[in-house]
Image (tube, rainbow, N blue to C red):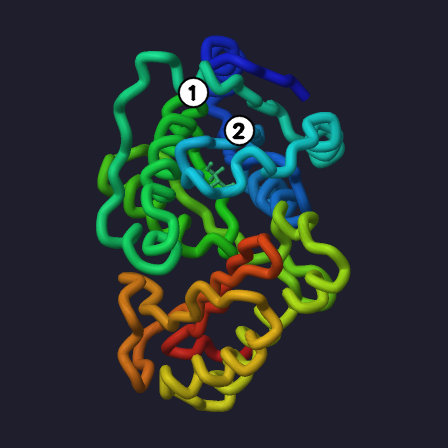
């Protein structure tokens, strides 16, 4: 595995792969890798000839009072995980490589960035879209892999890719969960055991609603009420919303189109997000 710090080196290194018409898969991350990231790497390795992972804690997607300074970082551990999981290139640029002193151009996403996390984290998706667009231009991947846990991020990135004609296919990989259901997140490490236990209300709520949906419940209000009962264990519910899977606007009730039930909640000072997809029409059973 090559560890690369600059765009010039990265371009040079990928030149051979491109000449040989190899497929380049890309997994952008902010590090502190977990099983969710490893699933993205696995998906990339299954479909591509070479996998590039980036590690860059992107300041422009954090608000002034958010956890940029405390965001977990452990490069030696991440490096080993990438090495052990067959990553070809680990791109870990310095801040100045991504945001040089004169930097002033941003990608401004539209309506998809406004609801859900966009309401509570103004500017977040502008930062995400900007860094992802820059990373796509640096890596020039054929496929890029994102986790479904960040459903709105996937939607924003997909739309940006289409709107700006970026020649990359976005692949969404299902959320990886701990055995008890908690969605994998780098932020889970900030939870003490008692908070970790209470954080389970999030996935329990989502799955309780999903069970009722599978049993035929289509009333949006009732599905959200079922989830909300379990969410009593969190310290602060930021949002619980059932939205249309394509537009991210509030889902019409009764549900007739695919919807996503999305949660953001604080447990202690840790902000966690999660979601489940409620597919319609319901796919046939195997
Ligand atoms: O999902 C993340 O880890 C980040 O938002 C991303 C896509 C790496 C951009 O900084």
Q: Does mark 2 have its CB less than 8 Å from ligand 1?
A: yes
Residue 19: x and y, percent? 46, 16
Residue on which disc 2 sits? 56
Residue 271: x and y, percent? 54, 54
Please tell me which residue is depicted at 43% across the width and 70% down the height of the picture: 240
For this view, does 113 lie left or right of residue 24? Answer: left
Residue 98: x and y, percent? 43, 20
Q: Quadrant of residue 61?
A: top left
Q: Is residue 16 visible?
A: no
Please tell me which residue is depicted at 33% across the width and 81% down the height of the picture: 255
- Residue 98 - label: 1
Q: Is residue 239 visible?
A: yes
**Up-down relation of residue 274 to residue 73 (above or below):** below
Residue 160: x and y, percent? 29, 41
**Up-down relation of residue 207 to residue 216 (above or below):** above
Please tell me which residue is depicted at 39% across the width and 38% down the height of the picture: 128
Please tell me which residue is depicted at 42% across the width and 73% down the height of the picture: 279
Q: In which quarter of the image is residue 123?
A: top left
Task: For the residues labelled 2 and 1, say whether their Cβ atoms are less than 8 Å apart.
Answer: yes
């Amino acid at each position: 595995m090559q560890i690369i710090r600059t765009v010039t080196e990265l371009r040079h290194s990928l030149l051979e792969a491109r000449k040989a018409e190899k497929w380049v898969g890309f997994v952008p991350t902010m590090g502190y890798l977990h099983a969710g990231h490893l699933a993205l790497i696995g998906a990339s390795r299954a479909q591509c000839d070479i996998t590039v992972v980036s590690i860059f804690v992107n300041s422009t997607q954090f608000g002034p009072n958010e956890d940029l300074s405390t965001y977990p970082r452990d490069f030696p551990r991440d490096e080993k995980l990438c090495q052990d999981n067959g990553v070809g290139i680990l791109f870990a640029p310095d801040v100045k490589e991504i945001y040089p002193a004169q930097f002033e151009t941003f990608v401004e996403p539209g309506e998809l960035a406004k609801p859900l996390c966009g309401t509570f984290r103004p500017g977040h998706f502008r930062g995400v879209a900007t860094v992802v667009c820059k990373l796509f231009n640096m890596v020039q991947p054929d496929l890029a892999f994102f986790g479904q846990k960040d459903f709105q991020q996937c939607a924003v990135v997909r739309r940006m890719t289409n709107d700006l004609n970026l020649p990359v296919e976005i692949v969404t990989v299902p959320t990886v969960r701990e055995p008890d259901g908690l969605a994998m997140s780098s932020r889970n490490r900030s939870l003490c055991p008692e908070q970790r236990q209470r954080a389970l209300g999030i996935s329990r709520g989502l799955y309780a609603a999903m069970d009722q949906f599978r049993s035929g419940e289509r009333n949006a209000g009732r599905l959200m009420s079922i989830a909300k009962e379990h969410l009593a264990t969190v310290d602060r519910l930021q949002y619980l919303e059932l939205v249309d899977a394509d537009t991210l606007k509030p889902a019409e009730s009764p549900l007739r189109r695919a919807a996503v039930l999305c949660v953001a909640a604080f447990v202690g000072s840790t902000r966690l997000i999660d979601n489940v997809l409620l597919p319609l029409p319901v796919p046939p059973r195997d």
